[in-house]
Amino acid sequence: MTFTEIYHSVIPFWGLEIDFSDGEFIDFSDDEPGFSSDLFAALWNRVEKEVGYNNSYNELMVWTMYQIFHHHAKTLFEEKIYYLSPQEVDMWKIEEQYFLNLSEAIWKKELADYERI
């Protein structure tokens, strides 16, 4: 499987806009606060269900996209921006995180068949 195939099969499930207007910062008593949004989490759960669990590449892509989108949402929320367009997020940042996630031992089989293009 190639990154491009996986990316394009999953990105439509996120829709045109991610709403995190109900977001809040969470104090974990460490250097940097966490960020939480019930709206965003509900979308993530819906995307997981719609994509399903029968394709491990797509399953990992949903998680990876959530990680990257969450990071962007937190940054935007700090700037008082409460929405983001998934398609505007640099897909190569997603690929970098995807490859990092895929490099975990549990994904050894998938990594062997993965193409970074």
Image (cartoon, helix red, strand yellow):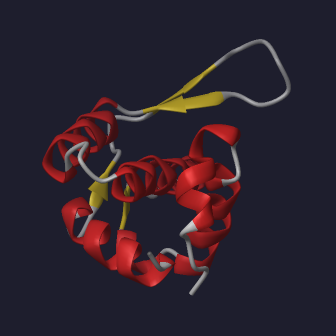
Q: Quadrant of the N terminus?
A: bottom left
Q: For residue 111, what is the image quadrant?
A: bottom right
Query: Taking 60 as reference, is 94 above or below it?
Result: below
Along the viewing direction, whichever of 50 and 90 lies nearer the viewer: 50
Residue 90, image x and y in percent? 55, 79
Look at 45% across and 50% down and name the residue there: 60
Q: For residue 5, what is the image quadrant?
A: bottom left
Look at 25% across and 36% down and name the residue there: 45
Q: In the current view of this chain or complex, which residue is farthest to the right?
A: 31
Query: Is 32 placed left or right of 2 in the picture?
Result: right
Residue 106, image x and y in percent? 60, 38
Query: Taking 104 as reference, is 102 above or below it?
Result: below
Q: In the current view of this chain or complex, which residue is farthest to the bottom?
A: 117
Residue 99, image x and y in percent? 65, 63
Query: Is 20 placed left or right of 52 in the picture?
Result: right
Question: What is the count of numbered marks?
Answer: 0
Q: In the current view of this chain or complex, which residue is farthest to the top?
A: 29
Look at 47% across and 80% down and name the residue there: 2
Q: Is residue 4 visible?
A: yes
Look at 26% across and 65% down and name the residue there: 17
Query: Is 21 placed left or right of 93 in the picture?
Result: left
Q: Is residue 90 visible?
A: no
Residue 98, image x and y in percent? 58, 60
Query: Taking 98 as reference, is 4 above or below it?
Result: below
Q: For residue 86, what is the image quadrant?
A: bottom left
Q: Quadrant of the C terminus?
A: bottom right
Q: In the current view of this chain or complex, which residue is farthest to the left?
A: 50
Along the viewing direction, whichever of 18 and 116 lies nearer the viewer: 116
